Amino acid sequence: MNLWKTIIPVTAVALAAVASIPLYSSPYIISLLFFLFTFVGLAIAYDIFGGFSGYYNLGFGAFFAIGAYTFPILSLGRLGFQTHPIIAFIAAPLFSGVAAFLLSYPFLRLRGAYFAVATFGLIPLMYNLARNLSTITGGASGIQIVVTEFFGMLPGFYIAMAVTVAAAVTHHLIGRSRVGLALRSIKEDEDVASEYGINGFAVKRLVYVISGMYAGLLGANFGFGLGVVSPDGVLNLEIALAPLIMTIFGGPASLTGAILGGSLITLIQEFLWLNIPFFHLATYGLIILLVAIFAPQGVVRIRFRRRLGRVPVAAPLNT
Amino acid sequence: MSVETHLTIILGGILLGGIYGLIALGLTMVFGVSRILNVAHGDFVILGSIFGLIVTTLSGLSPFLILPLIPPLFFAAGILFEKTMVRRVIMRNTENTLAVSILATLAFAMIVEDISFFGLGQAGLNYVSLQVFLQPINILGFIIPTTRFISLIAMVMLALAARMIIQSTTFGRRLRATIQDRELAEVVGVNVSRMSALSFGFGAALAGISGLFLAMITSLTPFQGVQFTVIALTVVILGGLGSFTGSIVGGLIIGIAEAYTAFLWGTNWARVVAIIVMIAVLVVKPSGIFGGRR
């Protein structure tokens, strides 16, 4: 517990320092921080379910998109009735949660690769729905969110930061709780876990919904911050698979890993966008390939895997 | 709708479904043998169509005539892919093969897609298309587009050939044994790592052929690679992972469903229906239509 006495104040000071950055920096830095916190938050939210349970939720981006679309659809009255933006903002994670709850029925009965493969289908499903239901979603060009009173990116940055901190706390609490323990035992061996009285489906569903709700909240804030929600903006493959790439890069089932992976991948992508006019996707692919070759357990577990006994190495996956 | 309309839609659906089935067959074979989820499988489809485009433009031959070139070339490419990407990258680490296979093959897909997009752009092309226009033929009063008809026949023959190879040859028996139980297959003398290489070769050859046929009926962009993987995965989940019959039947179901949706509501709804069909099947039977075990 002594460790926490130092970690908590240090984190608080660091967050306060980051929160004060917009006071003396350019809009570019604010937007970079906005993306950084959104993606770190997504990586943590993904890891709450995917990291602990060992399930690869390739459809995670769908919940992000549901949140991103719910906010403008409700607050701009796309369905024929208009709600207050704050209510729409609260509704976004609830809608994602409901979607996760409903989708848990077909998907969470699948295991290993089957789960990964089936949930991957959610991305094109949502993409095509967003494109086709053009009266509600604005089709391919999406919905413009006009923020008149203030610059959307700045409040977006503070909200993203708050949500990310909340997600990190949730990740930590779940990791320490009975639910986290149940998820870890599911990762080791789901059949044995159920023989010891763990209701695997219920536990997985609970955490799947929590993870999806954070994604929805971050999605709503993403659209709000950018000022536009479009199928190519929130449902492209890079965003959809980013949390998976980030958590594997950082190290699954580890808060440090998710934060590290999320920040590094976001910064790398930003660097590539700015500095490489051609083949930026190919370069990004090359970096992922290097991660797969040299750090398949995550950067938090490179080399000091043996020295730091505290970081558990991911268990082999039962397929 | 008249009978003729239905017939045209079903014919188109079977053709598309047959192509999906062949793509899915390769994917499920690779997964069954090596337990690797190859996200880049769809890129072999696109590479097949790009190869077709290059050869037809350079030689001026009909796409049907260059068909025999694809299987040996793509078989070799698949084996090369297995020897390098799978052996050297994915298999380096035995602890979380699934995650690493998704990451590594996705990275490969990104690289291939970006480079082929750039290459096509240099050639002044936005998409790959090999549409050939032949005189339509008239059978029993039904006017049938010749290209589609020949493709359909070729598709059926390919599916039958693949089935024969899997069911009756020694290679097929070893392949099925490896899929059923890797360790036991090894015990009875099957060279499992050789099977893994061959399955990648076989899968790539099927994908390459499918790409050539697809380019004859639609136009493709390099960035559709992963999209075809997703379609193939939908088909595989629908039919049951690891089931060969399931891939073909699943492909036909998705193909016909897409053809009807495209006719009734427009092509942009086709993909939505395919995935909804998959989710509906998962609710009823989580292991897919032909999937015995999970």
Image: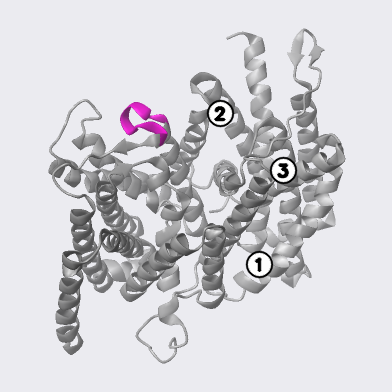
Residue A120 spot, x, y in % from top left: 47, 50
Q: Is A79 situated above or below A269?
A: above
**Subunit bearing disc 2:** B
| Mark closer to the observer (1, 2) | 1
Question: Which comes before the other along the chain, label 1 or label 3?
Answer: 3
- Which residue, as the protein is rendered here, is positioned at the far bottom? A307
* Circle 2 SS class: helix
Q: Relative to the observer, which residue lies in front, B17 or A128?
A: A128
Q: Which mark is residue A248?
A: none
Q: Which residue is mark 1?
A: B85
Q: Is residue B240 visible?
A: no
Q: Which residues are magenta?
A: A132-140
Mark 1 vs mark 3: same chain? yes
Q: Which residue is mark 2?
A: B257
Verify CB contact (< 8 Å) between mark 1 and mark 2: no
**Subunit bearing disc 1:** B
Which is the main secondary structure of the residues drawn in magenta?
A: helix
Residue at figure coordinates x 19%, y 76% from the top left = A14
* Circle 1 SS class: helix
Amino acid identity at mark 1: Met
* Circle 3 SS class: helix
A267 sits to left or right of A295:
left
Q: Which mark is residue B49?
A: 3
Q: Determine the image quadrant of residue A130.
A: top left
Residue A139 spot, x, y in % from top left: 39, 32
Amino acid identity at mark 3: Ser
Residue A229 spot, x, y in % from top left: 33, 42
| Mark closer to the observer (2, 3) | 3
Amino acid identity at mark 2: Ala
Residue A293 spot, x, y in % from top left: 57, 74
